[in-house]
Image (tube, rainbow, N blue to C red):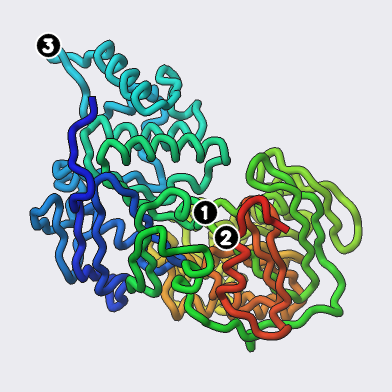
Amino acid sequence: MPSARSTEQAAVVATDAGKRFGGFWALRGASVTLRAGRIHALVGENGAGKSTLLGILGGRLRADEGTLDVAGTPVAGGSPRASRRAGIATVHQELMLVPHLTLAENLFLGHWRTRGGFVDRRAQRAEATALLDRLRVDLPLGRRAAQVSLAHQQMTEILRAVLADAAVLLLDEPSAALAEAERATLHTMLDQLRSEGHAIGIVSHDLDEVLGLADDVSVLREGRLVASRPRSAWDRPSLIEHMVGTRAVTPSARAIPAAAAPVAVQVRGVRAGRSLDGVDLEVRRGEVVGLWGLVGSGRSTLLRAIAGAQRAAGGEMLLDGEPRPLPRSVVESGRAGIALVPESRRAALVAGMDAAANFHLGRSRPWLSPQAERAVVRPWLSRFGFAADRHAVLVGRLSGGNQQKVLMAKWAGRVPRVLLVDEPTRGIDLAAKTEVLDSLVDLARGGTAVVVASSELEEVLAIATRLVVLARGRVAAEFDLSEEPRTVAEILAHGFTPEGDLR
């Protein structure tokens, strides 16, 4: 039977919470209350402070300002273990399951049921089955985590917290990668947990999910809590207005008009599982096209499909007007003059090599001495603002910004006809971000067709001539940024477009 909990009581209260990273305040003056028997949604643009606030509520981060109370008791924060003992569990976007263990084993990971000093698997199975029946959830308990769907993995994480008797559940984008039917199952489970008295906090970009599921909604913008109200006081336009204000979009001084240039690459009807549903895109020589969308929109999948890095992708391609199938590998796309700078620096660079060795990695070239290698790569690294005194430093010892410069130089140095860049400035400081964005514009000025995919709308607007908005695997809107000014809210509204209204 579920634990008895009084509803409407304050379970977790953050008062004037603030968190600083270096000299930058990611969150300041945020006060929010999660109550038993209610679902509280935190919404805002990327970088608004949602995940920071969730980290403070869940004990992962210690606030630099303000206080945190759990069930009426002040706590210091900064200790996930102490938070779990206090009855708080956080389910992150990056799930924490052990792939080779069954779902039943993962459910009890860290809190095994034992008898006589041994794990009582029969008791665990009976307890798990009773919980699934109670919450009307169907899970293949005997299958390994690596063999089941993302939805089943997500629900296993949540149910593990319930079995550990967590009174407070904090969920970071719990349904971003789920199909509609899977979302409905997750929402049914959350409804049941709410009815049993759990306090649930959700970070979500899906405004339909927020308005259909939450009891309370708090909006953050630029590290500040701008409003916190019951769900009945919100609708989609008011949420978006509070998220972004009335900022106008004006043409970037760095953007390059390319309307008269020939089309370098065109793709039609690109599909990839549930991630892309018939996407069309064209990019001209010397043009920077921005690709923006929320989590799960398909922006990264589209870049991988064009570059031959997405399995089971289908569609048509025209390269400089010549029809050809989508590349089946990054080697094939590279031969065709298409280069992809992936989102993950760690996966694309070798930490134990210096910048020059990484630049030349995978290239067909005669043997060069280390000095000659550095001479070849020096102009490209300097183009991205990489200091000469760091050329011999192992990449693993460089800052994130300098690693990104090495990665950008590596692919730009191949002088591709099409350069696809995914999240080019994630995790780097403002100075490095400016250098990277300026360098992309310089490459376009040289005739390269550049596509920049980012979850940061402002970043895309800073350099793009055209903006393509993706939502749930389809093109929701396209904007010529050289035309009349628009508001950021207008563009964001297309990213939040309900599935039935996609155009």
Q: Residues within 10 Å of mark 1 (few under 14, many from 20)?
A: some
Can you say which quadrant of the picture contains the C terminus? Answer: bottom right
Q: Amino acid at mark 3?
A: Gly
Dots 1, 2 in contact, CB < 8 A: yes
| Mark sitting earlier along the chain (2/3) | 3
Who is closer to the viewer here, 434 or 357?
A: 434
The numbered disc on residue 496 is 2
Gap in Å between the C-alphas at discs 1 and 3? 50 Å
**Which element carries disc 3, helix, strand or loop?**
loop
Residue 419 in the figure: left or right of residue 170 = right
Residue behind mark 1: 208
| Mark sitting earlier along the chain (1/3) | 3
Question: x and y percent of residue 330 in the render?
Answer: 69, 49
- Residue 245 in view (yes/no): yes
**Which element carries disc 2, helix, strand or loop?**
loop
The numbered disc on residue 116 is 3
Question: x and y percent of residue 25 in the render?
Answer: 30, 75
Question: x and y percent of residue 26 in the render?
Answer: 32, 71
